[in-house]
Image (cartoon, rainbow, N blue to C red):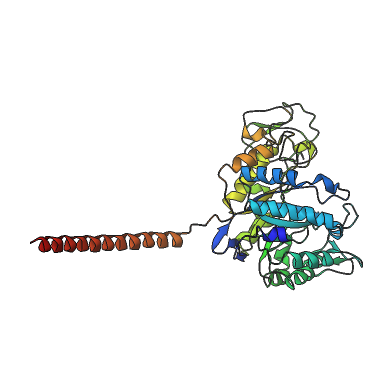
Amino acid sequence: MERLYSVKMASNFLVDGNIIRNHSDAVYIRGVSKSGLEYLYIDINSFTDTSIHFDIQLMYSWGINCLRIPLRDKHWLDPAYIDVVNSFIFYAFRFNMIVILDLHLQGGNKLQDKSMLRRNNTWDASKFWYNVSRQYHEFADIFFEVFNEPNNIDPITWWYGDEEFYGYKEILQVIRANADNICILGGLDYAYQWAFLREHPDILHEMKQFTNLVVSSHPYGYKGAPILPDGIFSYPVPVRTIIPTADYTGDCTSGITVPEVDIDQYGWNQSFGYLYHEEHFPMIVTEWGLDRPDTAIQGGWYTTHLLSYMSRHKMNYIAWAWVPDRIDYPSLLSRDFSPSGGSPCGTVENNYYRGPGYLFHDHLKQPRRILYPEISMSNTYLYTLLIIVMYGIKKILTRFASKQTTRICSFEKFEKL
């Protein structure tokens, strides 16, 4: 921990309406998830200082300002595991990045039909967050993503819990007893869906009683996609663009032609966007990407539209995942650590056929650092008034100095006489 204090930043991140601020400056997160530490079996020795430094420096060169670290709670019992996490935090801080600690998976179990914060008598989410919140409560640059992807549970269990699961409310109380760090909650349906809160105003009201609370969504490629009349799931695309069929085998000419579809038909506003606009929660899309083989060539359409949607609505977003060359995985990197790009049909000079890594990298050509200010109209007026006042003071001082010089010259002339 002493290593972290040596690079600790003088920051004060807090939630202000639907904006995250560092002191008074608005923060817009553009980040990536570094997958690896959430696996059940990991080679802890493969995470060296050299490799971690290389990853963070490369992220910084893209214009990334936030590192999300997926974790597995059972590994927190291993001091070597904590040391690796602290190494990621150390180098992220050196490059002025926010860090999100994400409780991605629990225990020794693989993905199950029901997914929420399971209770366990020996080691579980409550004990994990108790330890983590106590350890990092002095670092406002570290956000806590309480659980990755709740799924197949009802809204009441999601918030209040039951005999089998903790609810978000109980874990938030554990964290708030130790730390005021920003906390992130994911919705239902693998964190994607938030429409259920419209039918549960009591839960929404209780959520608003917690300070520094942010909501997240995972709008992966197959979420909210319009369905064509013949049942082929697809995406909004320009007129006369070919869409491969669901049993896509690599033939670039297979598929059908559809008319252009409005971007709002994705259903993103209804599923999660309304929380930002109507309920004034900050929104962080903590995962987005493609993870189905039949959508590989459609990735450009989805990525382009999603980035446009999130940017237009001033949302924060984190891409999944910072791993190289995984064909069955939404990799942002190629084997040589360049941005992933192209398609199964090869490189095509058309954004709709480029990979998410290439498009995200291109999207970040103008990097926003974590202190990027939001210039509102009121701020603009203040800046203008300040410039006018400073100009006036400069004129007065210049005139005063000019008079003083004239008096000195006259005095010297009188002495000579």
116 horizontally vs 353: left or right:
right
The image shows residue 123 at horizontal and vertical percentages of 89, 64
Q: Foreground residue, 277 or 381?
A: 381
The image shows residue 48 at horizontal and vertical percentages of 78, 46
**Residue occupying image coordinates x 80% and y 68%:** 130
Can the viewer see residue 326 in this picture? yes
Q: Foreground residue, 48 or 285?
A: 48
Can the viewer see residue 190 in this picture? no
368 horizontally vs 134: left or right:
left
Corner quadrant of residue 243: top right
Corner quadrant of residue 115: bottom right
Q: Which residue sits furthest front?
A: 416
Q: Foreground residue, 297 or 55?
A: 55
The image shows residue 19 at horizontal and vertical percentages of 59, 61
Quarter of the picture containing the C terminus is bottom left
Residue 128, above or below 333: below
Residue 363, above or below 206: above
The image shows residue 384 at horizontal and vertical percentages of 38, 59
User: Total of numbered circles in the picture?
Assistant: 0
Q: Which residue sits furthest left?
A: 417
414 horizontally vs 235: left or right:
left
Corner quadrant of residue 25: bottom right
Quarter of the picture containing the N terminus is bottom right
